[in-house]
Amino acid sequence: MTEKPLKDRVALVTGAGRGIGKAIALSLAAEGSKVVVNARNLEGGHAEATAQEIREAGGGAIAHYADVTDFEQARRLTQAAVDAFGRLDILVNNAGVTGWKMPWEMSEEDWDKVVSVSLKGTFNCTRHACGFMKEQSWGRIINCTSESWISRAAACHYAAAKAGVVGFTRAVAIDLGPYGVTCNAYAPYAKTDISGPRTIDLIETKYKLGKISREDYEWGINPPGPEGIGPLIAYLASDQASYINGKVFYASGGKIALFSEPVKVRTILKKQGIWSVQELAEQIPLFFK
């Protein structure tokens, strides 16, 4: 019998009580990893239910309730994995919140809530987990971003947070790569019990404006379930993916994609002096032809 690729590994998945996070936790456990299932609070008992499901299937799991936006709670969360299972190999920063506001309607509280969970929470958990990984010369950090890192209407706080996650992922990949620790990101799209209708509205608008194909429209308004996300995360957490570092993937059902690397696509160079405003007015439009 082939040995499971994550045998003897220990994973921590934030925001894992339900939806995509739960699907990821179950996939990691199915591939042999012990799992710390994190949720923000006891409400609904979702984290414990996920951990129990893993245990009933013969895996090892505990639930740990912590707010990832709190630096000290994040430290205790990562320590809980080590205390329970002796090590921490895999961190999946899945926790996140969204919201819908135009920039002129957005309050400071609206901004802070979204950015704190998605971006600060990702830093907090990474900060406390990466020390264990560096010491053992092996680790996998996998961060949840979104296609919204490119842009998103009526949610600039969410777009900013998810773009921040991409930048953070690429920088951490450089810092930790020499120590045998990789850091990658995934942009999931799935139908979950916490999905809202606003996303569907945006997809319909894009289609009516001719910005997406009929195929993408059909996929967007009838998204697959979250179970399609987990296998990619389990693969990225394995030894087989040791060569992948600093990359961003899209995952939705049977559709997996790799985002391109950011590159400069047009350049103008003035060999002597600097450009005048009038010269730029003549040259910059050429970028868009």
Image (cartoon, helix red, strand yellow):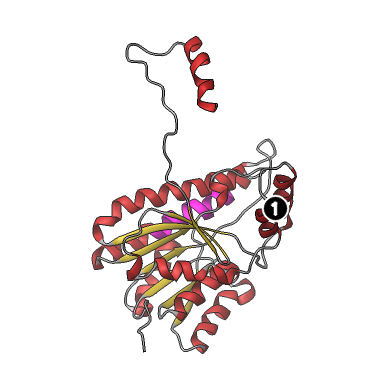
Q: Nearer the viewer, residue 108 or 215?
A: 215
For the stretch drawn in magenta, the main secondary structure is: helix
Q: How far from the left and from the top, in percent, is residue 52?
A: 53, 84
Q: Nearer the viewer, residue 107 or 199?
A: 199
Residue 187 lies, with reference to residue 79, above or below; the image says: above
Q: Residue at x 32, y 65 (%)?
A: 139
Q: How far from the left and from the top, in percent, is residue 262?
A: 43, 42
Q: Amino acid at mark 1?
A: Arg
Viewport quadrant of the C terminus: top right
Q: Which residue is mark 1?
A: 214
Q: Residue at x 52, y 47 (%)?
A: 161
Q: Element type at marker 1?
A: helix
Residue 136 lies, with reference to residue 45, above or below; the image says: above
Q: How far from the left and from the top, in percent, is residue 33?
A: 40, 78
Q: Nearer the viewer, residue 99 or 173?
A: 173
Q: Which residues are magenta?
A: 113-126
